Image (cartoon, helix red, strand yellow):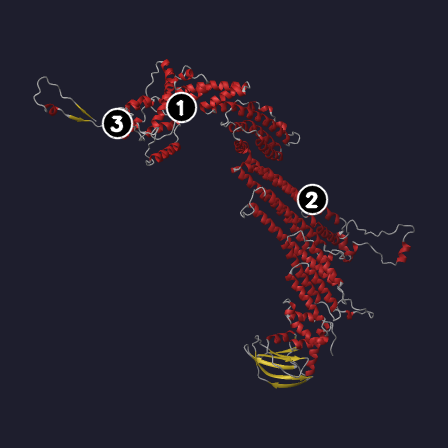
Amino acid sequence: MSNVKKPPVFIGPRRDVVASLKMASMEFSKPALPAEIMSLVLDYVGPTDLIRIAQTSKRMREMAYDDTRWVQRLKLMGCWDELQARKLSEQAAIMTGLPQGTGGVVLNGEKPIANGTEHQSHDRKASTSDGFDPTPISSVGNLEQSVTSTQDSALVVLKNVKSIRGQARQEYGKVHAALSPFYEDIANSGGSTESLVFKRYTEPESQAQMLSQLQAFAKSDNTQGWYEREQRLRMAVSLFETAALKEFRNGYESDDIDVLMRRYAHVLWILNGGQSAIDLFIHHNHLITRKSDYGNVMDCIDTSTGTVKLEHTQAFLTRFGVAYNEEISIINRAFPPSLDVVTPFLEKVGSDVLSPFLTALFDELHRVNIESYLKAVSGTFVQCFNLMKDLRPSQSDNEGLHEAVIPVLRQIYEPHIDLYLAEELDFFRQGCDTAVRDWDRQLSEQAASTESLLMSNVNRQADKKDFLSSFKKVVMMPVNILPTFSSKPSGQKAEEEPKGGPPPSKKFSLPEAPTDELAAKAAIMNMKLEGIRSLFSIEVALSLVHAAKASLERAAQFVKLGGEYGDAAKQQCKGIFVSLLHILGHRHVIEGFDKAVDHLSNYRPREQGERDESNVKPLVTFLELVNVGDLILQMMDVFYEQELVGTKLTDRNDFLDPAVKAKKKFEQMLDERVASGLNKGIDVLMEEVDYLLATKQLSTDFNPEASMNPQRQTMDVGVSEAALAVVDVVSSHTQMLVGSTDKSTLDVFNQEVGLRLFAAICKHLKRQRVSVEGSLKLISDMNHYFKFIQTFKNNELLLYFKALRELSQIYLVDPSDAKELATIIADADRFYGIFRAEEVYEFAERRADWFQVRRDVERAMYGVGCSVIIPYWNDITCIYEVNGSILIYEGNDSSMTLLWYAAIFGTDTMWGVISYSLFSLFTIQHLYICVPLICGQQAQAITTTTTVQAAAQCSTFLSSSYTSPSEFRNEVLDSTNYYRHLDNAEVTY
């Protein structure tokens, strides 16, 4: 901008036309501050002065009318909606075809107006219409007259502000025109009751509305002196708020809820959101001031026993709930629906009413009785939780109450949760320890008293002095526990009885205590075996499970709190379950199984009295113990599924979870103890099987010809008494596990029993002599065993007893069919690979006619008879018999050469020499000359290793030198007769 100065005026005629131009000078002025700084300065200029500055120049007008400057003022007042502004700008761009972001808008079909500028028609004359003209407030009458036309619109001016880009100055001008007179008046008058606001508006709602708008309008005041003006406005608002609160409280105290209290609750809500009304209502609420009317702490404690009376705490909470619902009714009637009064009110009553009462109750119970303390903490938590779910919600927000319940409960119980969870776990552990310790103590005391009773009549000195008498008592110990029967004739006995006396009692007369030490020790062992079933108790397990369930249910209630305390409650619930497994499982069940296995290991069936019963008592007792253990394991599974998995306290698929790890470890240890006990039990059962086979199997069952009875009847082909007894005792014990153990354990047990039964039968069969006639009963027995094993449904085990059935057929072959017997023995497929040919050969040796068929069988199998081997200290040379001829071989490790052979007839020998290449044999440093006892007439070469090995198996080692063939023969016969004597065969001469 430039200023042109006029030349001085000279009086007189003008001589030169351009002289004035020559004398004129041009001066240019530049702004002293940059535009950016000027723009910042304008931010702190009042709106009226800012309009005046805009009238000074076009450049200043652009800076003063910049739309962002006025948008910022609207934002400070909270009247600008950026989303609405963007939406209107997009609509304007679509209607006019201008690119988005130009900032222009269409008003009443006129040409778009750019940001910060107006049309040329709206020049400086439009300043008065913008609402920025100063108002002469010295004349109140004039001021009242100026605002009369805008009386109604001024109360809602902020609500009517539109967020239009390019029109922010105009919108702010409307606000300034409506609110500036009231704001300046309060700033000048100091906020007294003489202010224009209180004179112009007589209704408290209108006054509150205007004061609320003025508080928002004051936020856009950033000119000099803004703080003083704001303080005066706050003073005015405070005076009005105090008067409104007084009326609000009067309405509450006078129970004028629907008129006075409701009106001023809305007034305060309009003024500043109603927070002051909420605070006054909460702090002076009857529910808090009259909390002593709901109950006393000592009323909830039984002073004689120190137990908590949860019914009294419930009565306290019930009275509290009734009073609370009455206050909620007042809130719903007095406060605006959009105002959240319930949440802060609930927090206040929780901290001022419930928390002090419960804290005093918990502290007293913790000092008096821990169990009552635990019940009180968890029980009152449940009562409070149920109470708050049943409280009346506000009329506007039903969900807000439920969301506020958890924080309030967390606030109440936060000081007590850590102590409670620690005490809960300690109390459970101590209770379980006490229960298990008491049970062990009772068992120990009972065992000690029984042992003391059994040993009370033992006279150790008498036993030392009379050893033979003591030995006799030990030998006759099974008889001592039976009724005493006299060996005298019945007639003589009758004479000794007194006439008219009572008949002798047929009942057993058991002595109160044994009279010798060994009998007492046997009775103690029986007592221990009988006590296996009481090594751990299902009643103790139930009591511990119930205690764990009670503790876990109490602790699990706090999971509802969520967050840190909810996680802590979950971990403590898992800790309770782990402690249950440790105490019940390891200290009670596992130790009980260990003791039971130890008792079974020390059991000697042939030293424990009668054997007429059909079962093994210790094994039966242990199986009963296994059933109890399995029942306890099932209890643990149900407890785990219902109390932990079902309530989502743990995840069964989380292998790192301590509860999952502890449960698997307990199951593994229990399976190991059961397996160990069953193994010992199977040992005992097999001893019983051996005993039954040894005592009930008659020698004539499988060899009727051995009977000394000349009137022997036809052979019985039915199942023997021994087989029936064995199957009965084994079946009764295997059936005990059905339904009480899992299928895998049952299959393993049955398979082990079956394999050991197979071994026992094989061992028993090798002790028998079986004739052709007696083989029928043997076959019946094997079929009986086979049918029993079929009930196990184990195909692999069934093959063993199929092989036994086939094995029994070798005794049915007639002696005349010895070659067919050899074919049966050598057929490995016939016995399903269970028996080798050598093993079947051993069973065949138990035929009663074995020495009659042996030669034919061996010839058919090997062509080898029983040989006498004479060692020589030379190179490898072997002499043996094939089909009645002697073959002598000599050679090294890799080859053998047939040197000569001899056919023997009686005692004569025919010698010959044959060169023959043979197979490789093991290294031998001796010469073996094999002399046959039974000779043939034809020599054949040996072509298999099996033949040589078989020949060596039936050889007898004799001296290496003889003086005559007769001496040699006598030596052979002596050795052979000794073998026959061992096998109960006839001696050969």
Q: What amino acid is labelled 3 in the image?
A: Lys
Q: Is residue 342 above or below residue 663?
A: above
Q: What amino acid is labelled 1 in the image?
A: Val
Where is residue 615? Give x, y as percent.
73, 56
Question: Does residue 309 appear in the picture of this structure?
Answer: no
Q: CA distance from mark 3 to mark 1?
A: 31 Å
Pick the front one: 545 or 286: 286
Mark closer to the observer (1, 2) = 1
| Residue highlighted by disc 2 | 442
Identify the disc placed on residue 58: 3
Q: Is residue 356 above or below residue 928?
A: above
Write down the quadrant of residue 844 in the picture: bottom right
Mark closer to the observer (2, 3) = 3
Say whether disc 3 or disc 1 marks the residue closer to the N-terminus. Answer: 3
Say whether disc 1 or disc 2 marks the residue closer to the N-terminus. Answer: 1
Q: CA distance from mark 2 to mark 3?
A: 109 Å
| Residue highlighted by disc 1 | 157
Where is residue 315? Give x, y as percent.
62, 28
Q: What amino acid is labelled 2 in the image?
A: Gln
- Image marks 2 and 3: residues in contact by CB distance under 8 Å: no
